[in-house]
Image (spheres, rainbow, N blue to C red):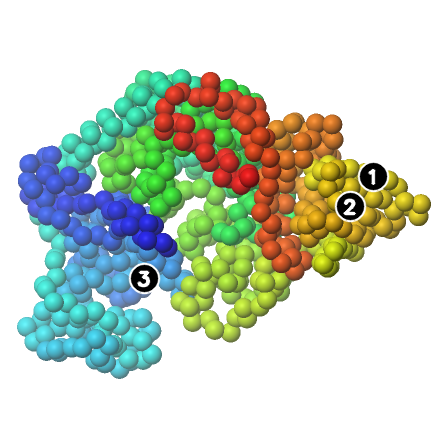
């Protein structure tokens, strides 16, 4: 990460204080309930604290029992006696700081080695377990970093080190059959405050001023932006807490948005039910977009999605939503989205108003941009809003249950609570594992979440698991081969021409149909039955052999043109009928007919936009076929900048359709960057 990213990351911090008088967390320096000045409670950045629900408490109990084989430890750590809070922290998988009574009493984490939830002691919990005689410890007067204090112990097990008076001075961890000093403590540990026993109502009252301030700011943003834009308002509802709060604030402001829900076909049942419940609760209109089985049919072409191979979003999310906006809001709309700054670095920097590069005809507004999770949950519970019950069952993130961006801990929750759904997905993963000759670790540790072996995320898993016998391979080997995807195409690049060879498919029909996109026009038919295409005004020819499985590209940039032809052939034979090409085409020259992207040459402007937005050509070919072909570079996307203006006009993004606001005008800049127009 560059220096700018690091500085922004440091600023992503939400201060937390603890009111000793009320024994509650507060987000403002002074408690709104009693007026007491709080004590700063340091948490790992960004400090996005939230209440622990029943499912979370069960996981904590499971982790403690796995670590110490003693059910009474939950009571010793006061987890079962009062309110518990969680703060997500960076880790190889899932890890959360557990806060009780103003003290971090430990970390709940998912260990991908054992596939178990485990517990990491803090100085507070280590001291408490020593005081109650619940854990074995070592007595030392002084210790040094990495000093061996005892032999034996399961790998990763923890042992407190105390002085003769019983005060904690260090924590040792077992590594390689030896307990070595991992952390030394120079001050007395902060123990959880026991009294008074706070209730949820106390926490709401203690944060009343902050809730009022956040609500007022969110309402004023929603109202002022809607007045400037003067477009129909839509609330994009996902079934999660963020979009629930954003929707409720807009309703309280006086806006009357329609609710839009996109069912990807990969949502958990409770989420779908919650969408209907919310619509009835607020008595609002609901527009329901369903992707059906698009993901499963596209899976046959693309293979499992990955963090560096996100074809799924284009197929089951962005394409159907784009069609919905085009059909229902041709003049644009204002979409209320439940986005918060503290979810990611990208969202932290996006602000209250932005335009999605895939959905340029609508503006997105997030009235809860500055909200933290604690304030959200206090607001939801205090107003008795109908939140998704999945949150009470240990789920921290809602969405597609097999999302490659999820942690393994989330997959384990799915496997426990929805065994039939998860077993169906694992069957697919095992099929691909066998088909692509992947090692057992590929499915066991969910390495399919990264397409290429050298991806930093996959390498971190290798290091954590101490897997050293994985071959890095060549670039052509690192991409996951896709079942049935091999078009049998090879590219031979020379100084003056490039040869395309196809072992199984004819090149004639896709090149004739798609050639106009690349500016190629049928020039003449050879006597022996072959075909010649040429680019007008440039010295470029494509000669197709009589058998139709060999094409010679000659002239300027022959390698780049040959690569574009491969993209066109792939689009033709692997079309997943997502409709992105026809939606984005400025000249309305493309229609997906009988599973083929057919081009009307009279209206085609040869802008190549369709190639760049097609998940087959821009994701599958660029991420997989390019390495198999041995193509030396990824060509820059090119198009005429005038077509951008035409596309804006078609999507009603001209200046007349947008309010004269600087923050709104800046949102138009994304599309040029997205398509990389010159």
Residue 578 visible in rendering: no
On the image, the x and y values in percent for residue 364 come to 41, 30
Question: Mark 1 vs mark 2: which is more N-terminal?
Answer: 1
Q: Where is the C terminus found, in terms of image quarters?
A: top right
Q: Which residue lies at the image location 18% right of the left edge and 77% below the top edge? A: 144
Distance between mark 2 and mark 3 Cα atoms = 64 Å
Q: Name the residue under label 3.
A: 118
Question: Mark 3 vs mark 1: which is more N-terminal?
Answer: 3
CB within 8 Å, label 2 to label 3:
no
Q: Is residue 284 above or below residue 297?
A: above
Q: Where is the N terminus found, in terms of image quarters?
A: bottom left
On the image, the x and y values in percent for residue 194 come to 10, 51
Q: Mark 1 points at which residue?
A: 523
Quarter assignment of residue 243: top left
**Residue that lies at the very extreme toward the right in this rendered image:** 527
SS label for mark 3: strand
Q: Is residue 603 above or below residue 408?
A: above
User: For mark 2, does the 10 Å Cα neighbourhood hold few (<14), some (14 to 19), or many (20 or more) residues?
Assistant: many
In the image, 155 versus 646, the foreground residue is: 646
Residue 359 visible in rendering: yes
Q: Which mark is residue 545?
A: none
Q: Is residue 419 left or right of residue 396?
A: right
User: For mark 3, does the 10 Å Cα neighbourhood hold few (<14), some (14 to 19), or many (20 or more) residues?
Assistant: many
Q: Which mark is residue 541?
A: 2
Distance between mark 1 and mark 2 Cα atoms = 9 Å
On the image, the x and y values in percent for residue 580 come to 60, 35
In the image, 367 versus 164, the foreground residue is: 367
On the image, the x and y values in percent for residue 234 come to 43, 24
CB within 8 Å, label 1 to label 2:
yes
Quarter assignment of residue 596: top right
């Amino acid at each position: 990460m560059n220096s700018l990213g690091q500085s922004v990351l440091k600023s992503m911090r939400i201060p937390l204080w603890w009111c000793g008088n009320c024994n509650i967390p507060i987000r403002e320096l002074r408690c709104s309930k009693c007026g007491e000045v709080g004590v700063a409670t340091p948490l790992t950045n960004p400090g996005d604290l939230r209440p622990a629900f029943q499912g979370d408490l069960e996981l904590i109990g499971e982790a403690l029992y796995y670590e110490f084989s003693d059910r009474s430890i939950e009571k010793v750590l006061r987890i079962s006696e009062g309110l518990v809070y969680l703060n997500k922290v960076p880790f190889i998988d899932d890890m959360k700081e557990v806060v009780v009574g103003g003290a971090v009493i430990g970390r709940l984490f998912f260990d991908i080695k054992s596939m178990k939830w485990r517990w990491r002691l803090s100085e507070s919990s280590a001291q408490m377990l020593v005081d109650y005689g619940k854990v074995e410890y070592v007595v030392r007067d002084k210790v040094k970093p990495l000093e061996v204090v005892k032999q034996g112990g399961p790998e990763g097990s923890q042992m407190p080190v105390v002085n003769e008076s019983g005060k904690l001075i260090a924590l040792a961890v077992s590594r390689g059959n030896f307990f070595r000093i991992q952390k030394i403590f120079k001050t007395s540990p902060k123990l959880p405050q026991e009294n008074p026993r706070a209730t949820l109502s106390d926490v709401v009252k203690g944060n009343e001023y902050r809730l009022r301030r956040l609500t007022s700011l969110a309402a004023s943003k929603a109202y002022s932006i809607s007045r400037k834009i003067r477009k129909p308002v839509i609330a994009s509802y996902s079934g999660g807490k963020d979009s629930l709060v954003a929707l409720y604030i807009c309703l309280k402001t006086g806006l009357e948005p329609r609710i839009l829900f996109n069912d990807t076909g990969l949502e958990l049942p409770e989420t779908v039910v919650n969408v209907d419940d919310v619509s009835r609760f607020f008595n609002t209109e609901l527009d329901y977009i369903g992707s059906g089985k698009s993901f499963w049919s596209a899976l046959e072409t693309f293979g499992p999605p990955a963090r560096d191979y996100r074809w799924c979003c284009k197929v089951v999310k962005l394409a159907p939503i784009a069609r919905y906006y085009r059909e229902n809001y041709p003049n644009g709309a204002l979409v209320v989205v439940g986005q918060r700054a503290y979810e990611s670095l990208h969202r932290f920097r996006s602000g209250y108003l932005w335009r999605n590069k895939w959905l340029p005809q609508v503006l997105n507004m997030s009235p809860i941009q500055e909200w933290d999770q604690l304030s959200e949950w206090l607001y939801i519970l205090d107003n008795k809003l109908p939140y998704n019950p999945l949150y009470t069952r240990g789920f921290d993130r809602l969405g597609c249950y097999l999302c490659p961006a999820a942690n393994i801990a989330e997959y384990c929750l799915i496997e426990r609570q929805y065994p039939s759904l998860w077993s169906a997905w694992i069957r697919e993963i095992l099929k691909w594992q066998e088909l692509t000759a992947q090692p057992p670790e590929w499915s066991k540790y969910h390495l399919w979440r990264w397409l290429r072996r050298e991806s930093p995320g996959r390498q971190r898993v290798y290091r954590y698991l101490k897997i050293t016998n994985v071959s890095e391979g060549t670039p052509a080997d690192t991409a996951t081969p896709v079942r049935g995807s091999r078009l049998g195409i090879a590219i031979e690049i020379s100084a003056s021409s490039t040869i395309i060879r196809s072992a199984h498919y004819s090149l004639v029909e896709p090149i004739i149909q798609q050639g106009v996109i690349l500016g190629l026009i049928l020039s003449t038919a050879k006597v022996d039955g072959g075909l010649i295409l040429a680019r007008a005004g440039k010295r470029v020819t494509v000669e197709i052999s009589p058998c139709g499985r060999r094409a010679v590209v000659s002239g300027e940039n022959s390698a780049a043109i040959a690569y574009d032809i491969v993209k066109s052939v792939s689009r033709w034979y692997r079309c997943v009928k997502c409709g992105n090409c026809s939606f984005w085409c400025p000249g309305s020259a493309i229609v997906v007919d009988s599973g083929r992207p057919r081009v009307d040459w009279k209206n085609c402007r040869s802008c190549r936009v369709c190639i760049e937005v097609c998940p087959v050509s821009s994701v599958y070919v660029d991420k997989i076929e390019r390495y198999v072909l041995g193509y030396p570079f990824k060509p820059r996307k090119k198009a005429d900048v005038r077509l951008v203006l035409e596309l804006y006009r078609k999507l009603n993004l001209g200046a007349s359709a947008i309010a004269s606001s600087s923050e709104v005008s800046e949102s138009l800049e994304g599309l040029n960057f997205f398509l990389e127009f010159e």
